[in-house]
């Protein structure tokens, strides 16, 4: 997982973009928008980082015993508060926000919620990765080609003759960081 994402889609368009086929009827359903109980809300942004509220698509089973397969959209705070934390969630500052798909079922921090089905789809138009050149970090945006926001170099004035996303992403993943 990256350290920054962006999602600048209007909430109404976001709902339409997340339509799904109802398991019982096969009809197209638009997920309900559910504001979090904290009162925080989603604000479209090109700079979404850890601890920021970002839109997620999740099963209604997360909110209740509803096993109908219905889904909702809800802004959620990016990060995982470990199950061993006792006390006020707002007081927990060192949230985990990064895990590897290869080890999610092995690391106890992530394996417990993962095995209980506590999953969601984080909605993002793209993400950022950084390349270090001469001790300077240069951010790059990665998106799908069909996205309305095209892949581009973020830092103006920087020149990189080989900015292929696959090479940059591979280089950033070979740094040994998690």
Image: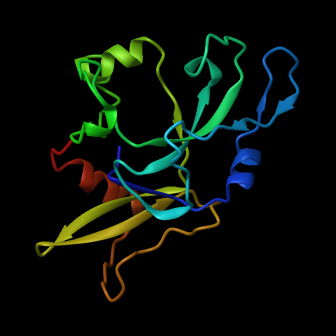
Furthest residue in direction left, as rendered: 135
| Residue 144, picture quadrant | bottom right
Above or below, comparing residue 176 to residue 104 in the picture? below
Rendering colour mode = rainbow
Q: Position of residue 55 (x, y in %)?
A: 55, 45
Residue sitting at the far bottom: 157
Please indicate whether residue 32 sits to the left or right of residue 63 in the image: right
Q: Position of residue 124 (x, y in %)?
A: 53, 51
| Spot occupied by residue 153 in the image (x, y as percentages of width and height) | 40, 75
Question: In front: 22, or 133?
Answer: 22
Q: Check the image and report above or below for 113 versus 27.
A: above
Q: Residue at x 43, y 42 (%)?
A: 77
As drawn, 36 above or below 143:
above
Could you tell whether 13 is left or right of 74 in the image? right
- In the rendered image, which quarter is residue 4 located in? bottom left
Of residues 133 and 70, the one nearer the viewer is: 70
> Residue sitting at 30 percent across and 84 percent down?
158
Number of labelled discs? 0
Q: Is residue 28 left or right of residue 104?
A: right
Point out residue 84 in the picture as x, y percentages from the top left corner.
23, 18
Quadrant containing the C terminus in the rendered view: top left
Quarter in which the N terminus is drawn: top left
Q: Residue at x 33, y 89 (%)?
A: 157
């Amino acid at each position: 997982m990256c350290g920054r994402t962006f999602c600048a889609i209007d909430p109404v368009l976001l709902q339409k973009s997340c339509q799904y086929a109802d398991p019982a009827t096969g009809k197209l359903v638009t997920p309900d928008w559910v504001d979090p109980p904290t009162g925080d809300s989603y604000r479209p942004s090109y700079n979404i980082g850890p601890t920021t509220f970002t839109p997620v698509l999740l099963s209604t089973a997360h909110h209740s015993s509803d096993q109908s397969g219905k889904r909702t959209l809800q802004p959620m705070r990016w990060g995982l508060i470990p199950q061993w934390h006792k006390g006020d969630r707002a007081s927990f500052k060192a949230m985990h926000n990064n895990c590897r798909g290869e080890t999610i079922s092995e690391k106890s921090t992530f394996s417990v919620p993962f095995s209980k089905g506590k999953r969601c789809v984080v909605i993002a138009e793209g993400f950022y990765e950084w390349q270090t050149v001469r001790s300077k970090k240069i951010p790059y945006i990665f998106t799908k080609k069909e996205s309305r926001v095209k892949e581009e170099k973020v830092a103006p004035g920087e020149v990189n003759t080989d900015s292929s996303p696959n090479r940059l992403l591979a280089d950033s993943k070979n740094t040994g960081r998690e």
